Image: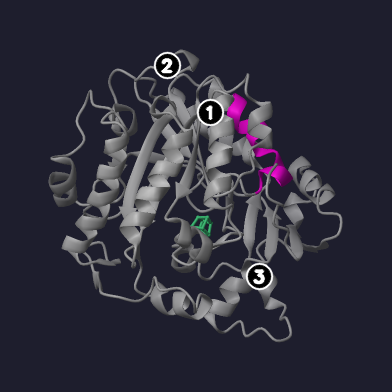
Amino acid sequence: MSSPVWLPEIVYVSESAREDSMTSRVLTRLPEVDVRYIPDGSDPLAEKTAGTDFSRDSERFSAGKRRLMLTRYQGSWMRACPGTSQHVCCNLWTINPGEGCPFDCSYCYLQSYLLRNPTLKLYVNTADMMNEVEQRISSDRSRLFRITTGEVVDSLVWDNLTDSSYDLVPFFARQDNAILELKTKSNHIDNLLRLKNEHRGHTVISWSVNAESICRTDEVHTASLDERIEAASQVVEAGYRVGFHFDPVVHFPGWEDEYSASVRKIFDRIAVGNVAWVSVASLRYAPQMQEIMRERFPHSDLPYGEQFLAKDNKLRYIQPLRFKVIDFVWKQLKSVSPAMPVYMCMESPAAWRNIAGGPPVAGSELQEVFSRAGRLPVIGQDSI
Ligand code: SF4
């Protein structure tokens, strides 16, 4: 049973999206919500709300999380993940069926990346997105494309409103050289369970996980760690492979005990053979986010402590501490099984040398994550 879906206070529908079938599906499922039709390109927050000071970035961003816009996207959909400068990239591709996330994590980079965005957005013309993906991946069949919808929105948070997984999962099942990664902190898996005979091993569901106290205090509105693990175990039963992202690993009193407890909790339920990949990354964020984090999450400790500007212009822990927290979680995971496919997200070549003994190599358990070209890893139900 999923946690209740988050509901917006106001839904704006841009004029060009009025007739789309996705628009009517979403509106039918939000019968109580205030719906307003607006011209394309207008700013919904231009209309002021009493008591909210939209000149303050933090208030504007918070107000945007309570409003949803249904609109059409006209740009290019599929992009290589921007990664981060001077760090090792895992070659993930991104498609964004929306923008902005109703969950509210204190460390979320959208607080700088989408700071001026007036609302959350859902794009109703996702058929165009899938056409573009099909063209791109069919132009290079020797390459395996790992593609996620979870870059600027949680992949499953809206699924109970949109039923997007009914389009995406069967679509990717037909693509021999592509895997869809649905990244989430929710437990909205009802549609995925109904698709258990249709995914053909081409969809991986991954959960962002953390120390239990960080999930509780710094990941507002998300499913609890236990709920995420329960959901992971159910999709494994439905034949999907799963992933986990220990991101961001945070340094706080008791962190070692809590992270090793999280690793144990997860892998007491999930067999390593069902795991496609696990990433580890330490806390990092743009310097301009620090003030917004303090204003929006006054009880969070994450914006405090010794953090330094790294080469990628993000605040990170000083290098020895950064390596220490990643190394600890890495070793916990490898102690479950040396075959655990663990990689570091947005980390430096020095971190790979220090923690993993060197960069990821062809033929290792990370072949699927880092593959760019050449022989494709075997995917499908048989390899699960
Ligand atoms: S779930 Fe992800 S995208 Fe959503 S608020 Fe949290 S960090 Fe941001």
Quadrant for the N terminus in the image: top right
**Residue at label 1?**
236
Q: Residues within 10 Å of mark 3 (few under 14, many from 20)?
A: few
**Is 71 on the left-hand or right-hand side of 178?**
right
Q: Can residue 82 be seen in this view?
A: no
Above or below, 75 relative to 44: above
Q: Are marks 1 and 2 in contact (CB under 8 Å)?
A: no
| Relative image position of residue 282 (x, y in whole percent) | 31, 57
**Residue at label 2?**
383
- First to last magenta residue range: 158-170
**Residue at label 3?**
43
| Relative image position of residue 4 (x, y in whole percent) | 71, 52
Above or below, 334 relative to 213: above
Q: Is residue 19 magenta?
A: no
Which circle, 3 or 2, is nearer the viewer? 2
Count of number-bearing discs: 3
Q: Distance between the residues labelled 3 and 2?
A: 48 Å
Predominant secondary structure, magenta span? helix
